[in-house]
Amino acid sequence: MNVDAESGVAEAIAGELQLMSPAVRSSRALVEQLLDPEFVEVGASGRRWDRRSMLSALPVMQGADEDGPQYVPTGMTGTVLAPGIVHLTFETVIDGRRARRSSIWRKSDEDAGWRMYYHQATPVPDA
């Protein structure tokens, strides 16, 4: 992987980790910086979210309270799909529930930086 690709993957991972942080999840302004204008998510519940609905709901969703359950990610890896497009995969645990996650980050221009374009979570059943 070249330096630009490594940098893109590192920036996407940093953004993903920020979105799991209660301080970011509870701040609409910070989340706006990390979600692409065309953001779409298919959550672990099967619900489809767009940017507007996610910005409204995220501050009260699980993981947004410093004193409550928080996301613990593992195995986060990234692949550059094309210039300015990074695909991340990983697992999370929150409050005893595991999910496999996949997200696509894109960089549209220098000012916006890397933003999450797509996210999907799939629950992992108990063994």
Image (spheres, helix red, strand yellow):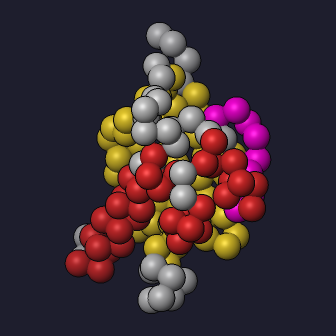
Please, is residue 29 above or below residue 103 in the view?
below
Vertical position of residue 70 compared to residue 58: above or below? above
Q: Which of the two residues, 61 or 114, is positioned nearer the viewer here?
A: 61
Question: Where is 48 relative to 98, above or below?
Answer: below
Count of labels in the image: 0
User: In the image, what residue occupies the spot 76% across and 47% down?
Assistant: 48
Q: Is residue 65 left or right of residue 72?
A: right
x and y percentages locating residue 7 in the rendered image? 29, 73
Q: Position of residue 96 (x, y in %)?
A: 46, 19
Span colored in magenta: 44-51
**Of the pair 74 and 53, the residue shown nearer to us:** 53
Residue furthest top in the image: 127
- Residue 49 highlighted magenta (yes or no): yes
Residue 102 or residue 55, whichever sits in front: 55
**Residue occupying the point 51% across, 82% down:** 112
Q: Is residue 53 visible?
A: yes
Residue 106 appears left or right of 11: right
> For residue 72, which quarter of the picture?
top left
The percent coordinates of residue 41 (x first, y second) are 67, 52
Residue 28 in the image, given as x and y percentages of width and height: 60, 61
